Image (cartoon, helix red, strand yellow):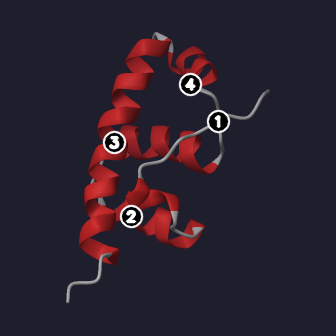
Amino acid sequence: MSSARIKLPPELDGLVLSQLEHCIDQANLGIEYTWLIRRYLIAHVPQADLAAELDWTRPTISIHITKAITKIAATARRLYTTHT
């Protein structure tokens, strides 16, 4: 299995693994989205492999991942942005 190449938004790019996991948990994604995004962001499973596992199309996986990452990035902004 190849490893997924992931381009994260700036809000997520500088986070350490524990912070990223915390953001995923706090984003309130639901069981399926949380599983999907953990497989993609933490385990680096490519979208094509996730699509095969779930019997979805790769574009469908991409749409769901994009929505989840947007929500996780908003959560990271709330949790880790310093307000002066």
Q: Residue 64's image quarter?
A: top left
Work out how far the residue at label 3 is from the one at label 2, CA to CA, in angstroms: 11 Å
Nearer the camera: disc 1 or disc 3: 1
Work out how far the residue at label 3 is from the one at label 4, CA to CA, in angstroms: 14 Å
Check disc 3 and report its element: helix, strand or loop: helix
Check disc 4 and report its element: helix, strand or loop: helix
Check disc 2 and report its element: helix, strand or loop: helix
Closer-to-camera residue (3/53): 3
Q: Is residue 46 left or right of residue 65?
A: right
The residue that appears at 34% across and 24% down in the rendered structure is: 63
First-in-chain label (4 vs 2): 2
Please state the horizontal and vertical placement of residue 19, each as a whole percent of the image: 48, 71
The residue type indicated by label 2 comes to Cys
Q: Is residue 45 left or right of residue 59?
A: right
First-in-chain label (3 vs 4): 4
**Residue 5: assigned label:** 1
In which quadrant will I find the N terminus? top right
The residue that appears at 52% across and 66% down in the rendered structure is: 14
Please state the horizontal and vertical placement of residue 78, each as a whole percent of the image: 24, 71
First-in-chain label (1 vs 3): 1
Q: Residues within 10 Å of mark 2 (few under 14, many from 20)?
A: many
Residue on which disc 4 sits: 47
Please state the horizontal and vertical placement of residue 31, each as a whole percent of the image: 37, 45
